[in-house]
Image (cartoon, rainbow, N blue to C red):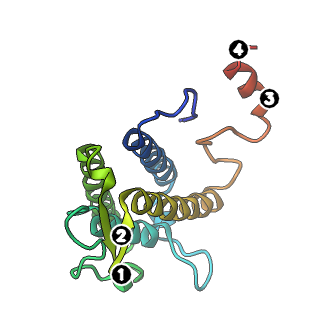
Amino acid sequence: MNVQYTTPPPDDSVALWRQFFERQRAFADHAFDQLSDVQFFAILAPGLNSCAIIANHLAGNILSRWTDFLATDGEKPTRDRDAEFDVPIEHTAEERKRIMERFEQGWSVLFATIDALSSEDLTKTVTIRGVEHSVNAAVLRQIDHYSFHIGQINIIARQLVGTENWKWFTIAPGGTKAFNAKLMGE
């Protein structure tokens, strides 16, 4: 899978946000798809997180931030952020499935919320941990946060899979000239 920006981004903020979130989601899925269950739970060094832990944290954050996005604080009282970083007791296919179902649930809520935003909603203010944000600032904050963690997932996954076996999501090393020539019709 090689997903590239081959057309200009839309002018509409909501469509642009959706495009960025879709790309990040695809980038995460691309990494997860290359990992075995053992690799999904692997911690490369003390003090680091596994892809499983990061996925669980992202799921918790996404569910908290995007559930009732315009109506309630983005840090829900039911969220236990610290527990999101606990090492899963079981390192099984079933536990991976549970984490990924929660991850999917979060993204479903995010996309449903984004798709429901109206132009009027873009002028509103939302709160995250009691701090007011414009809708634009809150969305950009989440794009930034998710991009950071999905980048971590990809670095961890590539180390576990090995560069020689990695299936590139973006342009593979050494492929830039050919890609640019194709894109520019040369």
Identify the mark nearer the N-term, 1 or 2.
Answer: 2
Find disc 4 in the rendering and name its residue. Answer: 185
| Residue 109 placement, left or right of 165 | left
The Cα atoms of the two marked residues, 4 and 3, are separated by 12 Å
The Cα atoms of the two marked residues, 4 and 1, are separated by 48 Å
Point out residue 121 in the picture as x, y percentages from the top left corner. 27, 51
Q: Amino acid at mark 2?
A: Asn
Q: Amino acid at mark 4?
A: Gly
Point out residue 51 in the picture as x, y percentages from the top left corner. 48, 66
Task: Say whether residue 92 is visible.
Answer: no
Quarter that holds the C terminus: top right
Label at residue 61: 2
Mark 4 touches mark 1? (CB < 8 Å) = no
Mark 1 touches mark 2? (CB < 8 Å) = yes
At 55% across and 75% down in the image, what residue appears?
43
The picture quadrant where one finds residue 78 is: bottom left
The Cα atoms of the two marked residues, 2 and 4, are separated by 42 Å
